[in-house]
Amino acid sequence: MTDEQLLTLTPDVAGLEKAAAILRGGGLVSFPTETVYGLGADARNDAAVAGIYAAKGRPSFNPLIVHLPDMAAAETYCDFNETARQLAGAFWPGALTLVLPLKADAGISKLVTAGLDTLAVRVPDHRVAAGLLRAFGGPVAAPSANPSGKISPTTAAHVAAGLGTRIDAVVDGGDCAVGVESTIVSCVGAPALLRAGGIPVEALEACLGHPLQAPHDPATPTAPGQLASHYAPRGKVRLNAPYAKQGEVLLGFGPVDADLNLSQAGDLTEAAARLFACLHALDAMGADAIAVSPIPDHGLGRAINDRLKRAAAPR
Ligand code: TXA
Ligand code: MG
């Protein structure tokens, strides 16, 4: 790592081979997924994983998601029960992370699981992520590629602005289509929702034929997305605002007269895809006070409202 510009790799065979070589050498590579950009390291290499925590300034009690190219690869690291098989079969590749019992001989660094006997795994639905995972041929631990507590990145430029040369490279694969992180479901015991995300809870419950257990008590976070303040822009955030007060910038939803609009058409999928880019843009504008339109709390609206609530939380 130097004080020059962050190395940006192209999402072609040459770029992915170079990225895989950096991972093999214990380096840190940011790569696009359909949700947000991840900050990847070899999940079996303690020093490499420690590098993730250092680059993000992340509290070390937060475990990381391991990214794999397919279900067969995931089964070499953790035990799938019937529920897990059903969910993976329906939603992988895709924006769903499953928390499962870790196999004893899996060889995953204890820094990845933060010492837990469970592992979070996901198979991303993104051509570049899949290409990198196959080129590397091993498990890639990857949190979102942002400094801890800040807004998640949905472009390579966000990654470069947030982490710069604290990491070794970013593979530029353009904008992330989903725009919010994966939904996390624990399949240890009765299936429980740990974090709302890119797959709507309604779709998971329809697949299972019954409701998921409620999220855990936010006072005892098991996922950093569950820490009260997270995803925070620099300005103060006020939610459910029909209009901006004096001195506020309005982040709109639907047909309102706003400085920035998540979706003029009131489309939750478009709003999720634009959420973090709009928060980054508000930072770039130097917004000190941000009012946000009400957002319906169903489908992807649940993940959007979850992120906005944390962005608005006292710091
Ligand atoms: O969409 C995503 O999930 C993105 C992309 C890069 O894949 N990744 C992401 O990672 O959002 P991160 O580290 O920002 O969030 C991972 C979440 C954390 O909230 C962590 O606490 C939780 O997964 N997690 C990881 N392992 C866990 C485990 N064994 N038990 C419970 N929660 C776990
Ligand atoms: Mg994150």
Image (tube, grey):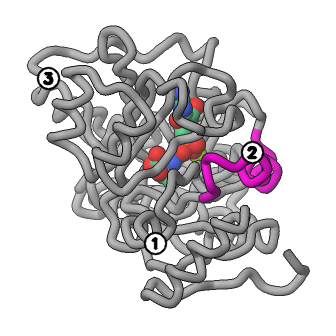
At x 39%, y 72%, the residue is: 131
The disc placed on residue 135 is 1
Q: Residues within 10 Å of mark 2 (few under 14, many from 20)?
A: some
111 in relation to 220, above or below: below
Q: Is residue 95 magenta?
A: no
The disc placed on residue 255 is none
The disc placed on residue 208 is 3
Residue 242, by quadrant, is: top left
Q: Report if the CB atoms under discs 1 and 3 are less than 8 Å apart.
A: no
Q: Position of residue 261 (x, y in %)?
A: 40, 63
Q: Earlier in the sequence, mark 2 or mark 3?
A: 2
Residue 172 vs residue 128: left or right? right
The disc placed on residue 46 is 2
Residue 100, by quadrant, is: top left
Q: Report if the CB atoms under discs 2 and 3 are less than 8 Å apart.
A: no
Q: Secondary structure at mark 1?
A: helix
In which quadrant of the rendered image does the N terminus lie?
bottom right
Q: Which residues are magenta?
A: 40-58
Looking at the rendered image, the disc whose residue lies closer to the viewer, 1 or 3, is 1
